[in-house]
Image (tube, helix red, strand yellow):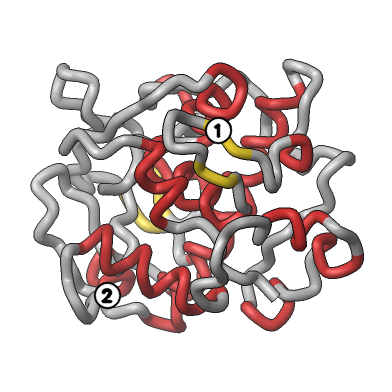
Amino acid sequence: MNIKYESKNSMTSFLATKLSAVGLIICSSLTPLFVTSESSYAESNFKNNNDFALTKQNSKARGNFSDFKHQLARRETGEANPSYNNTKNQWGFIGKYQFGEALLIDLGYYQAQVYYGDGKGTDRNYWRGTWTGKDGINSKQDFLNNKNNAQERAINQAFKLQLSRLNAELQQNGRSVRDFLGKRIGLRGTVVTVSGLLAASHLRGPGATAQMLLRGTDSRDETGTSIFTYLEEFAGYQIN
C-alpha cells in the first residue's frame, strides 16, 4: 500500500501533514542520491565511499535498482506483472507504484484545491483536481498510460524527495541517514540499507521512517503492514 504522502508546498493546508516543514532542500550532508534516469542514479555519493558497502553488511544482495523497483511494484499492486494502469486500490492509489494525489502534487504533476480524506486518518484519493502537463501528462489517463515513461520518472523523483526529507528529519535530531546504514534495528535486527529505507518511506513516509530509526517506532499502513516489514523485505538491493 502506498503511503499517505506529506506535501511540503503551498498546498499543505489540504494535506494531512505528518512531517515537519523541512522543505524540498536536499541537505548538504547528503548529496542527492536519486535523479530521473537510472544510469545517472548509479552516480550517487555512495559510489565513492564506504557507505554503500555498509548497506550490504550481513545482507545478501538481492538485485539492482530495476529489480528493487519491480519487486516494490509487485508488493504495491499485488500483481505478478505490475501494470501501469492499475486502479484496483480501494483508497484510490493508482499506477504501477500506487501513487496518491499528495505525492503527485509534491512532484508537480497534479494540483487540487481540496484534498479529500475519509475522516479516519486514511488518505482517500478522488482525483478531482487537475494535471499540470509535466512530462506531457494532462490527464489521469495519460498517467495511467505511462505516457513519456512518466511513472518511472515520477517514482525516481519520489525516491530522491523521500530520501532528502528523511535526512532532514534526522538532522533535526543531530543525526543523518549515514549514521544508520549497516546497523541493525528492531526486534529482528534488520540491517538498515538504502533500498530498505526507500521502501519504508514509500510505505509510511519519511517522518515515520525517521521515527523508526530514532526511536524504534512502528507504523502501519491501512492494511496493517508494518514499516519494519518493508525495511527488511527490501533490504540489500544494489543501487549501482
Instruction: Establish if 111 lies above or below 68.
Output: above
Q: Distance between the residues labelled 2 and 1?
A: 34 Å
What residue does disc 1 label?
Answer: 185
* Left or right of 45, for residue 127: left
Q: Quadrant of residue 56?
A: bottom right
The spot of residue 28 in percent (x, y) is 88, 40
Residue type marked 2 = Tyr
* Left or right of 119, for residue 183: right
Q: Which element type, helix, strand or loop, lies under badge 1?
A: strand
Q: Which quadrant: the C terminus? A: bottom right
Instruction: Establish if 5 lies above or below 89.
Output: above
Residue type marked 1 = Ile
Crowd band around label 1 with a 10 angstrom C-alpha radius: few (<14), some (14–19), many (20+): some
Residue 208 is marked as none
The spot of residue 172 in percent (x, y) is 74, 18
Residue 84 is marked as 2
First of labels 2, 1 by sequence position: 2
